[in-house]
Image: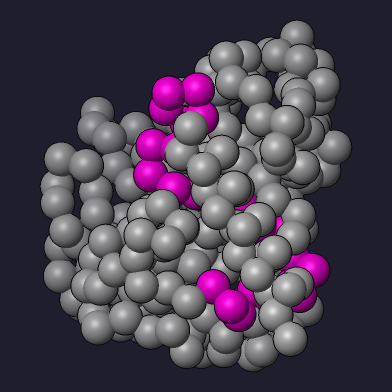
């Protein structure tokens, strides 16, 4: 497997990952405004090289921080989120037209009628156009710092993700999100995602998980069977919680454990 890590702007300057073949630049709130030509030139030389940009999760709107939401009922906020992603894609283009990983939004305090939200998402994606966009699947439960456990109302099922095939360049399988697409966990989701979406699956975010809502766990510390990855040609990015801390120890351990799993597959009869 081709393995990578997710790094912020700060991480690129402070951490080293000779074990990784690629990286994904995680944008945080306000990062787009901080990136000038000099920093872009620096990022182009980053090691491991940047293959993807992950759009920011939080944005400022109306004097408060909110989750970026392409499904928003508030038209002004929805349009603002589209604009943020347009700016994010422009940054991705400046780094060599790398893929832009996006979340759909649709996170609410409880389950609601997802159809109006899905229609807003379709409209937002149509305004953006598919070029370079990689849409990530979502878990049933979603944790937001300061708010607690919330619910995803779009792009949880494979069927809902697949309905957007013509509106994006491809899809990102988040293994923890996929496993947690059901409250009791779903190993089948991971295999089905790869089979149903086929060549539209472009990239994998990998961490372990435990139902109903524990995600971002270190490889081997949850309930996911990673055998569905055997022989995958897709780039796999380690996304364990706080993996960048202590010199990137969590990311390095995740890569080590996945390589050990690969060795077992290779030696199996």
Would residue 166 be found to the left or right of residue 30 on screen?
A: right
Q: Nearer the viewer, residue 167 or 20?
A: 20
Whether 246 is drawn above or below 62: the answer is above
Identify the residue shown where x is 41% and y is 52%: 218
Q: Is residue 209 visible?
A: yes
The spot of residue 143 in percent (x, y) is: 24, 54
Would residue 40 be found to the left or right of residue 56 on screen?
A: right
Queried whether the magenta region covers residue 247, the answer comes back as yes
Q: Quadrant of residue 232?
A: bottom right
Residue at the far top in the pictured view: 38
Q: State which quarter of the image contains the C terminus.
A: bottom right
Q: Nearer the viewer, residue 254 or 68?
A: 254
Whether 41 is drawn above or below 98: the answer is above
Would residue 14 be found to the left or right of residue 145 on screen?
A: right
The spot of residue 223 in percent (x, y) is: 36, 72
Q: Is residue 141 visible?
A: no
Number of numbered discs present?
A: 0
Which span is picked out in magenta?
Answer: 226-248
């Amino acid at each position: 497997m081709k393995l990578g890590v997710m790094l912020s702007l700060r991480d690129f300057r402070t951490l080293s990952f000779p074990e990784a073949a690629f990286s994904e630049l995680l944008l945080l709130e306000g990062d787009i405004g901080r990136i000038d030509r000099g920093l872009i030139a620096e990022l182009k030389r980053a090691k491991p090289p940047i293959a993807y940009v992950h759009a920011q999760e939080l944005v400022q709107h109306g004097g408060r921080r909110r989750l970026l939401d392409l499904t928003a009922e508030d038209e002004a906020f929805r349009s603002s989120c589209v604009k943020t992603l347009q700016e994010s894609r422009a940054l991705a283009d400046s780094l060599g037209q790398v893929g832009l990983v996006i979340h759909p939004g649709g996170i609410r305090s409880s389950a609601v009628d997802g159809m109006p939200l899905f229609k807003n998402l379709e409209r937002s994606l149509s305004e953006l156009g598919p070029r370079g966009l990689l849409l990530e699947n979502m878990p049933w439960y979603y944790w937001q710092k300061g708010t607690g456990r919330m619910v995803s109302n779009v792009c949880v099922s494979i069927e809902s993700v697949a309905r957007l095939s013509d509106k994006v360049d491809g899809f990102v399988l988040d293994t923890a999100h996929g496993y947690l697409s059901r409250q009791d966990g779903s190993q089948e989701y991971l295999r089905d995602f790869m089979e149903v979406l086929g060549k539209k699956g472009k990239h994998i975010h990998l961490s372990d998980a435990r139902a109903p809502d524990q995600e971002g766990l270190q490889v081997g510390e949850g309930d996911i069977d990673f055998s569905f990855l055997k022989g995958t040609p897709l780039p796999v990015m380690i996304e364990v919680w706080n993996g960048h801390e202590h010199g990137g120890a969590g990311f390095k351990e995740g890569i080590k454990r996945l390589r050990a799993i690969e060795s077992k597959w290779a030696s199996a009869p």
